[in-house]
Amino acid sequence: MNQLIRLVYASRSAVQPTTHQGVDPGIARILAKSRKNNARLDVVGGLLFGDGYFLQCLEGDARIVQNLYSKIEADTRHRDVTVLLQSSINMRTFGAWSMKYVPGEQRLQGLLRQWGETTFNPYQLTRDQIDTAVRFLRDEEDAVDTVPSELQPLAGEPDPVVQPPRRASPREAKPRGASRTQPAAAPGSTSFVKVVAGVALICLSALAFTLLR
């Protein structure tokens, strides 16, 4: 029978968290990926996040969990990844949760009050406090059951606005078969042509009268 272990680690978020319908968008993507991969690997666990810190618990086959932790350690979305606890267990305790997440600062504040703390810093937790955090994650009923897929836009993100093509007005529309718009005649140009033609005709008449004398 394969050995089962529980691995609990802490890390610091490398990005500034933002709230989005109760779940930070970055955490939502982490949960989506974790749930997909962990279900395939038969790994279960839970995730706590607060004050910019992660605390994550993984339970499963020892070799698989350790390989998974190596990949998590290389993830650039967090830093200072540190194992807080690694111990053998007889059975997985998170049921069907491939990655359980309990959102909300108020719930975490309730846990901190038990410890007499005001901020969440998993690096400073004692062994008993780590065990309490794992039980809190395992037993809390109000957890996030579904998260947006990392392959889909998060809910609430606006679709790009596409401007419809501008339709030409009837005055701007070209006649069918016209290849070039003819320039309009300048004002008064027709009258000017008539005057020039008249002067030329008078001059020709005078010249003809001179030659006939």
Image: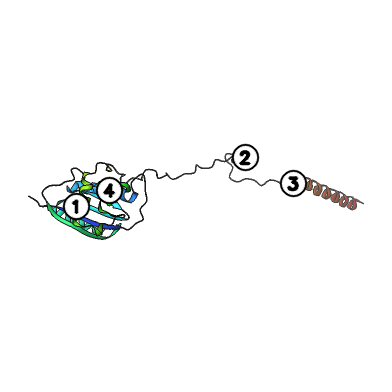
Q: Kindly indicate whether the residue at mark 2 contacts the one at mark 1 (C-beta within 8 angstroms).
A: no
Please state which of residues 14 and 126 is positioned toward the viewer in this rendering.
126
Q: Tag 1's secondary structure?
A: helix
Question: Which residue matches tag 3?
Answer: 187
Give coordinates of residue 35: x percent, y percent: 24, 47
Say which of marks 4 and 1 sits in front: 1
Q: Callout 1 environment at 10 Å: few (<14), some (14 to 19), or many (20+)?
A: some
Q: Amino acid at mark 2?
A: Arg
Give coordinates of residue 149: x percent, y percent: 30, 45
* Marks 3 and 2, the one that precedes in the sequence: 2
Q: Please tell me how many numbered marks the rendered image carries.
A: 4
Q: Amino acid at mark 3?
A: Pro
Say which of marks 3 and 1 sits in front: 1
* Marks 4 and 1, the one that precedes in the sequence: 4
Q: Kindly indicate whether the residue at mark 4 contacts the one at mark 3 (C-beta within 8 angstroms).
A: no
Say which of marks 1 and 2 sits in front: 1
Q: Residue at x 78, y 48 (%)?
A: 192
Question: Which residue matches tag 2?
Answer: 171
Question: Which residue matches tag 4?
Answer: 31
Q: Callout 4 environment at 10 Å: few (<14), some (14 to 19), or many (20+)?
A: many
* Marks 3 and 4, the one that precedes in the sequence: 4
Q: Callout 3 environment at 10 Å: few (<14), some (14 to 19), or many (20+)?
A: few
Q: Kindly indicate whether the residue at mark 4 contacts the one at mark 2 (C-beta within 8 angstroms).
A: no
* Marks 2 and 4, the one that precedes in the sequence: 4
Give coordinates of residue 104: x percent, y percent: 32, 46
Q: Residue at x 32, y 48 (%)?
A: 105
Q: Amino acid at mark 1?
A: Asp
Question: Which residue matches tag 1?
Answer: 131
Say which of marks 2 and 4 sits in front: 4
